Amino acid sequence: GHSEVIDGEIVSAGVTEVVEQGKNLWDEVWGIGSINSSSGNDEGGTASIYSKNYIPIIPNSTYIFVFAGSIEFENVKTRFYDHNKKYIGFNDNDGQTVYPNRTFITPSNAFYVRFTLPPGYGVVYKNDIALIAGSSGSYTPYHSNVYQIPEAIRNLPDYGIEGNVTDYE
């Protein structure tokens, strides 16, 4: 049989579901174009690709864009956003440019990031870039699994009440 090791962690646990997500924080949804460095808005173009969705991050924390490909390209053109998804800038917390396979610290008010890859990368995503929390790691495909908590458990007396310490095992 086929087995796969899922290197994930629980990222949220609500009353009705638990979400487990792998190390790669980027959902790998991309488009052709770029993200404007002044406005943080999508813009047209045919020479580069960009991440379409906002990637949740923790302010003032260490991350790394792990690049597993062989082609050379310059910086990762990061775009940081606050908790309301309002654009706040493109440099890291130290005012530096972000490069692949080199750690960076997110700005102190950044809760989301998106990015553009420079034209040197090409205009087809090659499944070789991961955004990982921490200072090291290797490329793994994005995955996120939502597990519904069974109704039988949700219907237990006092289930979901904060502070409930009843152990149902």
Image (cartoon, rainbow, N blue to C red):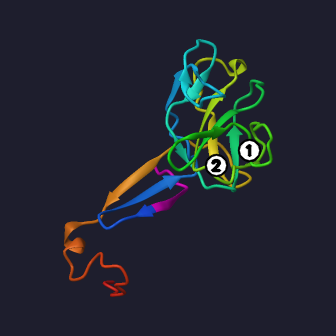
Q: Which mark is residue 132?
A: 2
Is residue 111 placed above or below 167 in the rendered structure? above
How many neighbours does mark 1 have within 10 angstroms: few (below 14), some (14-19), or many (20 or more)? many
Q: Is residue 1 visible?
A: no
- Marks 1/2: CA–CA distance: 15 Å
Residue located at (44% from left, 61% from top): 12
Name the mark on residue 92.
1
For this orientation, the residue located farthest to the bottom is 166
Q: Nearer the viewer, mark 1 or mark 2?
A: 1
Which residues lie in the magenta part?
1-11
Point out residue 25 in the picture as x, y percentages from the top left corner: 56, 47
SS state under label 2 = strand
Is residue 157 found left or right of 73 in the rendered image?
A: left
Relative side of 159 to 47, left or right: left
In this rendering, position of residue 109 left or right of residue 8? right
Nearer the observer, 128 or 77: 77
Q: In the visual, does 154 lie left or right of 124?
A: left
